[in-house]
Image (cartoon, helix red, strand yellow):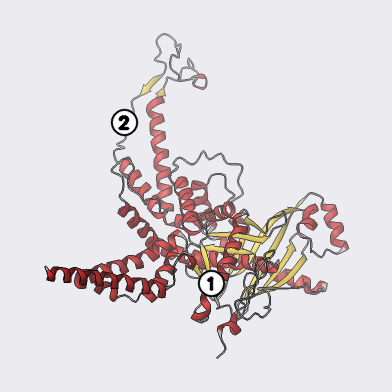
Amino acid sequence: MKSARARTLSFAMIAGTPPRPPRAVSRLPPPLATECSPRDRSSSEELMEVKTIKKRLDKARADRQRLEPMFDDAMRLTMPGRVRFTQTPVEDGSDVMDETGANAVSEFVSRISAGVTPPFQPFLRLQASSLVSKADRKAINADLDEITEYAFEQIWQSNFSQELNEAHFDMAVSTGTLLVEEGDDGTVLKHRAIPMPEMFFERGGDGTLRGKFHRGEIEASEIESAYPGAKIDPALARKLKKDGDRPLNVISYLRTEPGRTPVSHHVVMIEEHNAIIQERSFSGKGADPFIAYRWGTNAGSAWGRGPLMNSLAAVRTTNLMVELVLENAAMSIVGLYQTDNDATINADTVNLLPGTILPKEIGTKGLEAINMASGNFNMRDVVLNDQRTNIKRALFNDMLSDPNKTPATAYEVSERMADLAYRSAAGFSRIFYEMVCPYFWRVLHILEKRGDIELPTQNRRAIRFNAISPLAQAQFGRDLQALLQQHQMNMALFGQQGATAALDIERVLPWMQERSGLPEGLFKKPADVVAAVQQAAQLMANAAAIQQQGGSQQ
């Protein structure tokens, strides 16, 4: 069997740094993803392709239309001013009476950003997988740590955090989409959150998002600059020149064919002119620039189900209840009035303001206040409190106790963080595999395409991703707590030395380091730790023997 060095490894140091002797036998690898040149197409082939794309788009649009009213209502009540599915006039948010849903969604987005991709901190580590021999792992992990550090330097120099936060708002409803491209303004990476109303998805047989449509508007005069590699024939160029600044619908369609090496086909089409202006093919991990991810899914549906959907009924109820309360308050303050229809008072000119004097004819009653039977609103506080609690719990906003009461202890805070990790385990795992992993593969692909790094490429299982975000650490904390509890039980039964002897320190230390997410360079080798523990035990034994001998002599 070949060694791990010859089987899987090939690294290049970061561009611009002095080369050093490789720690492993290197072999120049193929790039992470290859891009095929666009092929020439006849007009009949192109028309048939256009018809196929439009047919697929219509099918994806029909799949989304059944969900649009629910998505639109959720965005209307919790995200005023955000682009929605229904084309409506400019909104001023006057129909939103309760801000609980909007605040809860904003806090959910901040909590997920801080828990999954904390700003200016690494949230993932590249490590050698178990396919690599133990003798080589430490050297390989050292190289991977350097690559990881460089990758995060480029990530935090880009607009990653702000654009991902915008995509999280769509994920709170259904499906977030982040477009990751190579930068062109001095930065290595460029990110853009694609609004959910501009996206359509095709579901694959395995439940993944096999096809992605992005339908956006762009001025005809800007198409050539927006797509520098576009093939525009003279006839189409004349049409675009005639269109001038008229906005045109441009459809970007990317479909991924699964396999050992995924292949993605990307087509850009101008809908009004039925013309394909760009066609490319990619192969390998990280080639897909569209990162679409979901919190949860409904069986058989391409669209996700965000946590806001679980509390949409409560959001509607609180909004309606607050609206009724305000209407009741307005009735109580202003009141209702009646008057005789004798043409002595023009109700259209009456302003019910403090200090207003209304003249009336002698013998007429004028305006008379109506004594309204005030409804019993004693239950409104109960209903509102229950519904607001449901909204906050569905969006994970109920983590700490009431700040007006006794402050929470450190143990309570740690337990609540662990509870958050358990409650969000399903959503976190899906985000990790649908957003974090594809995103980092995309970053590695761009960096390798630029020539900054090289990675092991044979069978792709030589590298594994280790999540080190706060939410991941909270989940790992349960394992560490279980180990400490077992150690304390062993101490109670067998004493300090017996409990220490029960642990295989050479295996426990790497296990703890892996779950802590800290670099290996901060810790000594397990063998050195074992030797130090044995030496300390020997010194204690010698001291006890000397003390016992001195006591016997007395």
Reading the image, the residue beneath label 2 is: 373
- Of the residues shown, which amino acid type is indicated by label 1? Asn
Q: Is the residue 232 above or below the residue 350 in the image?
A: below
Q: Toward which corner of the image does residue 255 lie, by quadrant? A: bottom right
Report the residue at 54% width, 54% height from top.
120
Q: Secondary structure at mark 2?
A: loop
Q: Position of residue 20 (x, y in %)?
A: 65, 71
Please report whichever mark, 1 or 2, sits nearer to the chain's N-terminal start.
1
Q: Position of residue 21 (x, y in %)?
A: 64, 75
Horizontal placement of 313 versus 291: left or right? left
**Distance from label 1 to label 2 (Cα)?**
76 Å
- Of the residues shown, which amino acid type is indicated by label 2? Ala
Residue 297 seen in the figure: no
Between 188 and 367, the residue placed more toward the observer is: 188
Report the residue at 85% width, 53% height from top.
242
Quadrant of the drawing holding the C terminus: bottom left
Q: Do labels 1 and 2 touch, CB within 8 Å?
A: no
* Disc number for residue 442: none
Reading the image, the residue beneath label 1 is: 141
Report the residue at 48% width, 14% height from top.
344
